[in-house]
Structures are given as C-alpha cells and as structure tokens.
Image: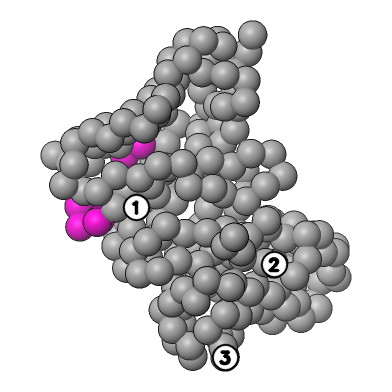
Amino acid sequence: DVKVTQSSRYLVKRTGEKVFLECVQDMDHENMFWYRQDPGLGLRLIYFSYDVKMKEKGDIPEGYSVSREKKERFSLILESASTNQTSMYLCASSLRQGEAFFGQGTRLTVV
Amino acid sequence: GEDVEQSLFLSVREGDSSVINCTYTDSSSTYLYWYKQEPGAGLQLLTYIFSNMDMKQDQRLTVLLNKKDKHLSLRIADTQTGDSAIYFCAETTDKLIFGTGTRLQVFP
C-alpha cells in the first residue's frame, strides 16, 4: 500500500520560531511537492523537487525553504514563522507526470 | 504562466447529476486530473484524462476535455451523499498545478 507520511497532523508554533515539516514516501518516487491549502485559494505550490538535492520554487516560495537529502524525504522549513503562514500543509509525491499521492496534511497554527 | 480555475461551490440533490467545471491555461499539459478531498483528509486521485482524449468514462464518472477551449469537466451521475467533498482539477507539465477546488454539497 502506497504511503506518504507527514510527521505531524497538528502543530502550534510561536511567531519567529524555525519550523520543520517532514514528509516521507515509500514509493521510490522522483518527484515530491509541498503545497499549502487555504479556503478559497485551493492548493498553492510552495516548492517541488525532481530528485535528491534538487529543488525548484513553486508559486509562493517566500518565507519557506526545502531540503531533499534523501530520495524518500522532503522537508519544508519555515525560517521564521509568521501568523500568515498558519495553514494546512500538504506533501505529495509522484513519478514523472504520474499520479500524485498525498499525505494527510499538517495543520500549522502560528501564534 | 499556469492558472487553473474552478467555481467554489456546487449544491445538488441526491440522485441528480453533478457537473464540476475547470479551465486551465497551459496547453502543453500531458495529463489532467480530478482529485477528491474528503473532510480532514488528504487528496485522492479520482480519475484522469490524457490530453489527446476527448472523453473518459469510469462507472459514474465522466470526464470531458475540450482542448481548444482548455475546458475540463467532471460529471458524477446519480450523485450520493458520500460524494460530498471538495473536488480539485489539476494540470501537469513539469509540475502539478491545482485549481481552487469546488465544494460539492449533496442534500437529500
């Protein structure tokens, strides 16, 4: 059974904290993605990665960075969390141009 | 640039057909997808269509693609309360771009 696992379902952090969101997939997929989901805005792509140590900016990369040291793991980093980064964060993985599999999401609240 | 648009809400009576529409901008998309998100869950692939097809049918689901107008639709026949969810269309070229999502509400 294919699986994308996000490390936390719910997270509460303080403004200014450095936040790490972890995502692991067990399908040997090349592509991994981070999205944030906000009401009325759908899913917006933050960063994606085609391969280990590769990363590409999505539509809203400001305030975020990513790390892909191993093929199965893609980390999203909020360097200094702000309240406007309160959102649902979704990780996904896929083969090239193939079906994307999603994690359950992490609901992050920044206070 | 890529942009995928959907209407935000659709409300239908149980047993009726639902039609969810989507417009996209990138004509080089190879695949177009429909994903379903149930409350509190991640997204799951519902169906997809290859860009050289006009139509695809899969049980109660029918996908229509008009490449000239860059219009994609998802028809759900005999809509059930269990179909209540948010439906996202997505296009893929080198990355996967989603629409805003359509919240389908099915009432008895």
Residue B66's place in the image compared with A109, above or below, is: above
Cα separation between marks 2 and 1? 24 Å
Residue A95 percent location from the top left of the image:
40, 69
Which element type, helix, strand or loop, lies under badge 2? strand
Cα separation between marks 3 and 2? 16 Å
| Quarter where residue B61 is shown | top left
Q: Nearer the viewer, residue B98 or B63?
A: B63
| Quarter where residue B104 is shown | top right
* Residue drawn at (51%, 10%) of the image: B15
Q: Amino acid at mark 3?
A: Glu
Residue A7's place in the image compared with A75, above or below, is: above
Q: Amino acid at mark 1?
A: Glu
The segment highlighted magenta reads B22-30
Badge 1, how many Cα within 10 Å: few under 14, some, many 20+?
many
Residue B58 percent location from the top left of the image:
36, 32
- Residue B23 painted magenta: yes
